[in-house]
Each structure stands twice: as C-alpha cells, then as structure tokens.
Image: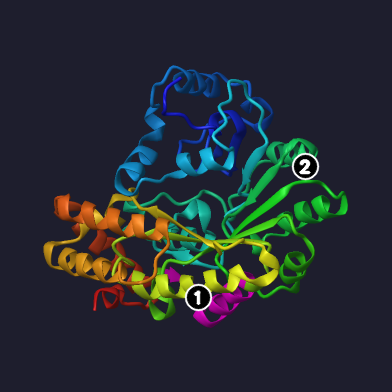
C-alpha cells in the first residue's frame, strides 16, 4: 500500500434516491445496501486502493488536495485515526432520505432540493444545467430504508442530510429509534440552520452523541441570494444557539465564484461562533467549532475558474484582506490555496458565459439580482 489511501470504500455507504455510492463525490450505483458490501464494484475500488492506484472516481479529492491541502479523503483518514482496512465492514452511512428542502441554493441540484426540481421541470434554460427528477419527491427505496432500520446495531455513525433533514418525518423516526433503544450511534446532522421545531432544540440538549454541521456560504443579504430560502435572522440565531449548546458543531462552506467576495464577513461570523463554542463545559477543548470548506469543481460554471480578469483581481485582493483576520490553520490554508490557484488558473470564458445564463435565469425565476454579489 502507498500513501494514497481512503477508508471510505471499506467503511462507508452513501445512499440517496439515485442509488448507493462510496461517498458523496462518487457516482451512484444501482445496488441496494444489502448487496453493497459484497459487490464487484466496491471490491474493484478497494483493490485499486490496496495496489496504490488512485481510482478515477477520486479525481475531485485529488483536485481539492492540490488546491487547499485537504479533501473528504484526508478528513476521512482523520475520522478513522489513519487506520488502513483491507475488508469491508460498513459502520458509517450517509442517509439522504429524500430531497425535501425549503432552500434552493445556487450550487445545489434537483436531487437534493424539491424546490429546485420544481423550478427546473418546466424551464428549458435550467434543464441545460441539471436534469429534473421524474417524481414529485425523490425518496430512497424501501429496501434501503429497511436496511438502515434493521442494521442500526452495526452502525457507529449515521449522517443525516438532504435535502434538509430537519424537515423530514422519516429522519425524526430514525432518531427517535436510536434514542429510545439507547444505541451508541453518533448522529451527524447537516442543516441549513432554518429549523424552528422544538424537537431539534430538545434533542441537542439531551443527546450528547450528536454532531451538527451548519452550512453557511455567506452572511446577511448575500446568503439570501446564494442560498435562496434563507431568512438570515433565523439562521444566524440558530447558528449562535448551536455554538453555545451543541455537544459538537462544525460550519461547512461551499466556495464558488458567487461567494468568493463575501468570505471576510463570513469568516468573522464563524470566528464569533468558534469563540462561543469553546467555553461551555469544555466540549470543544480549546479549538471551538471546525470550519470546513468545499471548493467547487463541479458544476464548472460555478467554479472560481470562471472569474474574468477584473473580478479575479478583486477576488485576490479580497482574499488577501481575509488573511488579516485571526484565522485558524484550516481557514488560512484554504484562503492561501485559493489565492495561489487564482493567480495561476486561466480564465474559462465559456464557463463564465454559461454561469451568466444560469444565474440570470434563476434571477428571472426568483426575482433576484445575483450581480449584487460582485458590487
């Protein structure tokens, strides 16, 4: 075995309405969870890993590591304490029950948001950018739902995202089963921070083995354009409440050319959350909440590579100003990596034109003006 290794093909299954995958960055397969671990597909990926080969499906992690030094692969290595596995034993499931979501984020897709799907179904321009779902709501099949319910005893970590998991009754049911049976499962919820149901506040107060990840791509009015559906006052209040009450919490930021000029106020807000999360009961030691990043490679029309020279220069200036903030190591590494990347990458005029067509169409549908993001 060589240094290139990822534990996810041996330990993890990602399931949504389109099938099962090794992780959220890899292609889905038409295999149910009861067949997944023994499938030829999984075995082939494992053998490539053990032979020191980088599977083609891992190219997104390769690109992210080149740009920022981190990726889902390196995070997963840390999650498993850099252990190397040679046999399959699924103990971590990313369960995306359906695509119900009250947000329509510009970097998202119909399979993860029924609102985006509804916008796309009768819009030929948007159908150039993503394919609508041929269902009212895209749900995972009953076989996979039943597998998760029956195999909770072997699962050590259950990731619940979406769509928006706090809007899904089936997610509540699974959590209630875990709590009622007192199962030793770490529950990981990725949320847009819009919830107002007392269930989630009470769960946070009572369940220590619960980790929240709040997705924040910008703050204030910029957040409301980039992540349509955001009421910033609600999201801001929930992020602050979780920072001071959750046993564990991260912030996740997807970086596109839409928010690259809005990172400074976001970083300052996250620093506030990190300070809030350090003190109560010592839950985060002296580190506070982690701020993790996804630098968009796909879809290409949202990549920072799209920025024309004038906006690229503004972005580099803005990122340099971010370095004056009291950043943690991961934040600083990401910002420095973006600066280096932007200084070296060639302007992709084709994707910039596609981006303009895409975002202008969303503006016409939603009554927004995305060009405000570059003012």
Q: Which mark is residue 272?
A: 1
Rendered location of residue 274, percent (x, y): 53, 69
Q: Quadrant of residue 241?
A: bottom right
Mark 1 falls on what kind of element? helix
Which quadrant of the structure image shows residue 140? top right
Residue at 57%, 42% in the rendered image: 79
Q: Position of residue 24 (x, y in %)?
A: 50, 43
Q: Which residue in the protein does label 2 denote?
A: 149
Q: Is residue 66 visible?
A: yes
Q: CA distance from mark 2 to mark 1?
A: 38 Å
Q: Residues within 10 Å of mark 2 (few under 14, many from 20)?
A: few
Q: Quadrant of the C terminus?
A: bottom left
Residue extent of the magenta highlight: 227-243
Q: Is residue 362 left or right of residue 6?
A: left
Vertical position of residue 160 compared to residue 153: above or below: below
- Using the rendered image of the protein, determine whether residue 107 is visible from the camera's viewpoint: no
Queried whether the magenta region covers residue 231, the answer comes back as yes
What residue is at 38 percent from the left and 76 percent from the top?
265
**Marks 2, 1: nearer the viewer:** 1
* Foreground pick, 267 / 150: 267
> What residue is shown at x 46% (from left), y 37% (from top)?
26
State whether residue 125 is above or below residue 26: below
Closer to the camera in the image, 139 or 319: 319
Image side of residue 183 versus residue 95, left or right: right
């Amino acid at each position: 075995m060589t240094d290139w290794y990822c534990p996810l093909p041996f330990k993890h299954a990602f399931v949504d309405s389109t099938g099962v995958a090794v992780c959220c960055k890899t292609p889905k397969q038409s295999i149910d969870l009861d067949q997944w671990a023994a499938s030829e597909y999984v075995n082939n990926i494992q053998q490539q890993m053990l032979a020191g080969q980088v599977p083609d499906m891992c190219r997104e992690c390769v690109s992210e590591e080149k740009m920022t030094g981190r990726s889902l692969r390196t995070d997963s290595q840390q999650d498993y304490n850099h252990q190397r596995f040679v046999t399959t034993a699924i103990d971590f499931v990313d369960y995306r029950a359906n695509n119900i979501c009250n947000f329509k984020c510009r970097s998202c897709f119909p399979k993860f948001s029924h609102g985006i799907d509804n916008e796309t179904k009768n819009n030929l321009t948007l159908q150039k950018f993503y394919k609508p779902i041929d269902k009212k709501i895209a749900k995972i099949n009953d076989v996979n739902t039943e597998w998760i319910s029956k195999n909770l005893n072997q699962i050590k970590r259950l990731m619940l995202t979406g769509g928006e998991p706090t809007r899904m009754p089936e997610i509540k049911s699974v959590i209630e089963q875990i709590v009622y049976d007192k199962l030793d499962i770490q529950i990981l919820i990725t949320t847009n921070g819009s919830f107002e149901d007392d269930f989630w506040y009470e769960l946070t107060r009572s369940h220590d083995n619960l980790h929240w990840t709040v997705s924040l791509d910008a703050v204030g009015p910029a957040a409301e354009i980039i992540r349509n559906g955001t009421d910033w006052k609600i999201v801001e209040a929930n992020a602050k409440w979780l920072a001071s009450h959750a046993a564990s919490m991260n912030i996740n930021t997807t970086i596109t050319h839409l928010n690259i000029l809005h990172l400074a106020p976001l970083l300052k807000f996250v620093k506030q959350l990190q300070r809030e999360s350090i003190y109560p009961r010592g839950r985060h030691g002296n580190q506070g909440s982690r701020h993790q990043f996804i630098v968009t490679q796909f879809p290409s029309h949202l990549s920072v590579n799209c920025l024309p020279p004038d906006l690229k220069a503004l972005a580099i200036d803005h990122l340099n100003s971010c370095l004056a903030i009291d950043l943690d190591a991961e934040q600083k590494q990401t910002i420095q990596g973006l600066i280096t990347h932007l200084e070296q990458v060639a302007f992709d005029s084709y994707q910039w034109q596609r981006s303009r067509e895409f975002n202008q169409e969303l503006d016409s549908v939603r009554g927004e003006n995305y060009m405000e993001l570059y003012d």
